[in-house]
């Protein structure tokens, strides 16, 4: 069988660490929104699967710590619970992140993609734990270092699974590359955070009134668009900054399920 040629899409790691890329905030938001209108169901279902796994892990671990209330009230137990949930859930969440990456290059995805990167699960878990620890430490230092790291490290997980980098290399490469366009990335994330905040305002205003159910329903409806939009924005950022390699195929409607040529 003749081997299909490999096409480069977007940027590259070599160019990224030199700052040889550009980001257009308005264009990225517009493209991500158009993608979201066509692909939100896969991401939403993937997030539901991750949420279920996270709840299951929380129940199992907290039961060994004396119950969920005890685990939350005790700082050491709460920290242990958070670590365990991070280590177990993120190998599945990276599948959702990769949905956004695949959407950015025109591939369709399915919810089953959350199970497709478990072979790299140990590296993903370590990367997630390291990045969350760095961000937490940064937030204790007058918040600004934490905010910087939260943005700069937001693309670490796709680097681990798509570029097959080690956790430390992915962290270093991500910081090196994103520092050039950090403020534009921050602007994108800030817009999405503000969208969530505005969507939650009716819930806060309604409180325990009769309108509370309607407000909650409205908030969930908004999240069903904002959450996929967030991951599609990250996917476009990854494409533009680090790029991907994919096999050229005449089938433009190819569905991405569990394999990717990197």
Image (tube, rainbow, N blue to C red):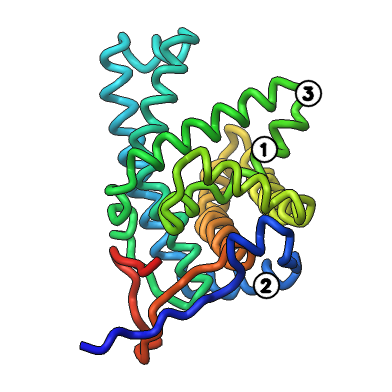
Mark 3 and mark 2 residues within 8 Å of each other at the beta carbon: no
Q: Percent x, y for residue 252?
A: 40, 87
Tell which tag, 3 or 2, sits nearer the viewer: 3
Residue pointed to by mark 3: 142
The secondary structure type at the circle numbered 3 is loop
- Is 130 drawn above or below residue 225 in the view shown? above
Task: Residue at 49% x, 10% y: name it.
Answer: 75
Mark 3 to mark 1: distance in Å? 13 Å
The secondary structure type at the circle numbered 1 is helix
Q: Earlier in the sequence, mark 3 or mark 2?
A: 2
Q: Percent x, y for residue 103?
A: 48, 70
**Toward the viewer: 54 or 23?**
23
Q: Percent x, y for residue 235?
A: 54, 62
Task: Residue at 39% x, 9% y: name it.
Answer: 70
Residue pointed to by mark 2: 30
- Is 27 drawn above or below residue 15 in the view shown? below
The secondary structure type at the circle numbered 2 is helix
Tell which tag, 3 or 1, sits nearer the viewer: 1
- Is 67 drawn above or below residue 114 in the view shown? above
Considering every residue shown, the one lying at the far left of the view is 1
Density class for disc 3 (Cα within 10 Å; few <14, some 14-19, many ≥20) is few
In which quadrant will I find the N terminus? bottom left
Task: Residue at 36% x, 91% y: name it.
Answer: 250
Task: Residue at 74% x, 67% y: name it.
Answer: 22
Residue 54 occupies quadrant:
top left
Mark 1 and mark 2 residues within 8 Å of each other at the beta carbon: no
Mark 1 to mark 2: distance in Å? 26 Å
Residue 260 occupies quadrant:
bottom left
Q: Is residue 98 visible?
A: yes
**Toward the viewer: 240 or 164?**
164
Q: Earlier in the sequence, mark 3 or mark 1?
A: 3
Q: Earlier in the sequence, mark 1 or mark 2?
A: 2
């Amino acid at each position: 069988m003749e081997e299909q040629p490999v096409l480069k899409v977007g940027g590259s790691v070599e160019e990224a660490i030199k700052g040889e890329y550009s980001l257009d905030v308005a264009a990225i938001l517009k493209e991500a929104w158009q993608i979201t209108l066509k692909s939100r169901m896969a991401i939403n279902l993937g997030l539901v699967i991750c949420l279920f796994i996270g709840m299951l892990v929380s129940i199992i671990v907290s039961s060994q710590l004396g119950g969920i209330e005890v685990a939350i009230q005790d700082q050491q137990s709460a920290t242990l619970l958070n670590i365990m949930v991070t280590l177990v859930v993120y190998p599945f969440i990276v599948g959702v992140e990769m949905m956004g990456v695949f959407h950015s290059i025109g591939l369709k995805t399915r919810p089953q993609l959350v199970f497709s990167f478990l072979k790299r699960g140990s590296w993903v878990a370590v990367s997630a734990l390291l990045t969350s620890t760095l961000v937490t430490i940064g937030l204790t230092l007058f918040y600004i270092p934490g905010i910087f790291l939260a943005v700069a490290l937001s693309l670490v997980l796709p680097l681990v699974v798509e570029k097959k980098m080690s956790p430390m290399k992915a962290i270093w490469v991500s910081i090196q590359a994103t520092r050039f366009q950090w403020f534009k990335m921050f602007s994108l994330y800030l817009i999405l955070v503000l969208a969530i905040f505005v969507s939650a305002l009716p819930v806060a205003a309604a409180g325990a009134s009769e309108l509370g159910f309607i407000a909650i329903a409205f908030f969930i409806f908004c999240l069903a668009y904002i959450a996929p939009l967030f991951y599609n924005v990250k996917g476009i950022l990854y494409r533009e900054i680090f790029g991907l390699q994919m096999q050229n195929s005449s089938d433009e409607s190819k569905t991405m399920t569990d394999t990717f040529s990197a």
